[in-house]
Image: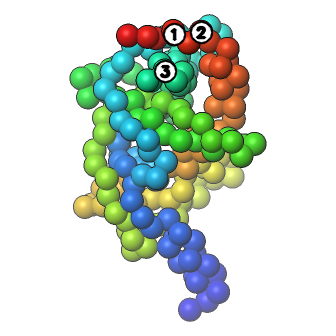
Amino acid sequence: MSEAILETKAGTRQLTGKYLTFTLQGESYGIEVLKVREIIRHVSITAVPQMPAYIRGVINLRGKIIPVMDLRQRFDFQNIVNTDQTCTVVVQVTLPDGKNTPMGLEVDGVEEVINLNAADIEETPDFGGQIAIDYILGMAKVKGVVKVLLDIDRVVGATAAKLISVSQQTPANVGAQ
């Protein structure tokens, strides 16, 4: 085997492990299960002025204010409609400055936790020079379905850093039930 193939296989092996899979617009995505803190059903979200459209607002989760991002809008999907399957996945995000913070991700529905091995994962295909794909870890093949594995730190990263300062200035009773 050539050295490039060994490097590719070694990189793929690093992606092995457990992933929480969920749906957005009928497609399947996965994030490392170690990033997931909890999954909550629909809760009241308090809007925060002057946020990007994909930031739904903040929630009060057991006394902690957590920003919520709508992944459908973040990925520019159309026809965004909440259903009874819509839920918020609370993840621990590592910000560009190295700090960890919780962030809610609104998704269409949660599927399952899957265990992926190296044979299940392929590198992200080349979509052309001008398309940013650094937030995609790889592509998993599970039961004939392709699941896009996301690097949630890169999907959320810079956005979360801006939001943390806003949510920390929000009154403690925001979104209280």
- The reply to whether callout 1 and callout 2 are in contact (CB within 8 Å) is yes
Determine crowd level at label 2: few under 14, some 14-19, many 20+ residues with C-alpha closer than 10 A: few
Where is residue 53? Give x, y as percent: 56, 17
Distance between mark 2 and mark 3 Cα atoms? 11 Å
Residue ID for mark 1: 174
Q: Which mark is residue 63?
A: 3
Query: Is residue 9 visible in the rendered structure shown here?
Result: yes
Measured along the vertical axis of the image, is residue 172 above or below residue 34?
Answer: above
> Looking at numbered disc 3 in the image, what kind of residue is underneath it?
Gly
Give the colour scheme of this rendering: rainbow
Distance between mark 1 and mark 2 Cα atoms? 6 Å
Query: Is residue 72 visible in the rendered structure shown here?
Result: no
> Looking at numbered disc 2 in the image, what kind of residue is underneath it?
Pro
Q: Nearer the viewer, residue 15 or 126?
A: 15
Measured along the vertical axis of the image, is residue 165 above or below residue 45?
Answer: below
Q: Nearer the viewer, residue 5 or 173?
A: 173
User: Could you tell me which quadrant the N terminus lies in?
Assistant: bottom right
> Looking at numbered disc 1 in the image, what kind of residue is underneath it?
Val
User: Could you tell me which quadrant the C terminus lies in?
Assistant: top left
Q: Secondary structure at mark 3?
A: loop
- The reply to whether callout 3 and callout 1 are in contact (CB within 8 Å) is no
Q: Mark 3 or 1 closer to N-term?
A: 3
Where is residue 141? Give x, y as percent: 35, 62
Where is residue 31? Give x, y as percent: 45, 49
Residue ID for mark 2: 171
Res 137 quadrant in image: bottom right
Measured along the vertical axis of the image, is residue 54 above or below residue 35?
Answer: above
Q: Mark 2 or 3 closer to N-term?
A: 3
Q: Is residue 141 left or right of residue 14?
A: left
Distance between mark 3 and mark 1 Cα atoms? 9 Å
Q: Secondary structure at mark 2?
A: loop
